[in-house]
Amino acid sequence: MTTARDEPIAVRISRALAERIIAGALAAGSRLRQDAIAEEFGASHVPVREAFRRLEAQGLVVSEPRRGVRVAGFSPAEVREVAEMRAALEVLALRHAAPHLTPAILDRAEDATRAGDRAGDVQAWEEANRSFHRLILAPCAMPRLLKAIDDLQAASTRFLFAGWRAEWEAPTDRDHRAILVALRAADVDAATAILARHVQWVGHRPGPIAPRGRL
């Protein structure tokens, strides 16, 4: 069992490994060696195992008998599954969040969209995109739901980075702006319909996945 003192180390390890997996620095099938990771982070095996459990909960690694922990792969069917799950859960969160969305929150979400438009690389764009979604969903005040959404968004980010093959060009996200227009007008049905379509786009797109402001 992870102690309170180990917990911050486990979080730091899982975050660092997640970033490597999502960015493609650790390829699907790569083995994560507990000893090497413990040595790298100056930690015992306890927080490393906790970090592995966190990564497995996010769908980023798999633990296999006699094979250890490896970076998980993904198929087109899994991409569609994540998109469908995100759509359902984010719509649920937005319906609960909508009554608590203030003009100030919506202004911050609009700022995040503008930051995405100005992004110089895919990592900066994804950070702004994730910020937009968190801002409009967090007021639902349902921590378990938000944690599940956050894990699915991490998977979506991995799909995005894995499919990126061209030079980066920041997209203009019309869906984000349409969602904000609907929320400012208190039209929750329209906002959730746009959000569902927005999130599901990647799951129904044929061929390689590439960012177009749709995650």
Image (cartoon, helix red, strand yellow):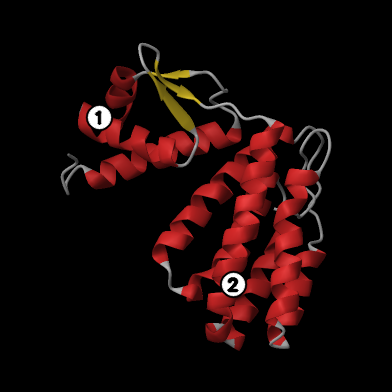
Give the camera-side residue of 94 and 40.
94
Give the residue at x 76% y 80%: 181
For label 1, count other residues whose C-alpha is less than 10 Å away and answer few (under 14), some (14-19) or many (20+).
Answer: few
Element type where label 2 sits in the image: helix
Label 1: which residue? Answer: 42
Q: Amino acid at mark 1?
A: Gly
For label 2, count other residues whose C-alpha is less than 10 Å away and answer few (under 14), some (14-19) or many (20+).
Answer: many
Earlier along the polypeptide chain: callout 1 or callout 2?
1
Left or right of 23, for residue 212: right
Left or right of 204, for residue 127: left
Q: Position of residue 174 (x, y in %)?
A: 82, 66
Give the residue at x 68% y 35%: 77
Element type where label 1 sits in the image: loop
Give the residue at x 75% y 59%: 198
Q: Position of residue 165 (x, y in %)?
A: 78, 32
Label 2: which residue? Answer: 94
Tell me if label 1 and label 2 are in contact, CB under 8 Å.
Answer: no
Q: Is residue 114 visible?
A: no
Left or right of 132, for residue 202: right
Give the residue at x 35% y 42%: 12
Residue 112, by quadrant, is bottom right
Q: Position of residue 213 (x, y in %)?
A: 76, 55
Q: Amino acid at mark 2?
A: Leu
Above or below for 48 versus 144: above
Quadrant location, the N terminus:
top left
Total numbered circles: 2
Q: Position of residue 150 (x, y in %)?
A: 50, 54
Q: Is residue 76 visible?
A: yes
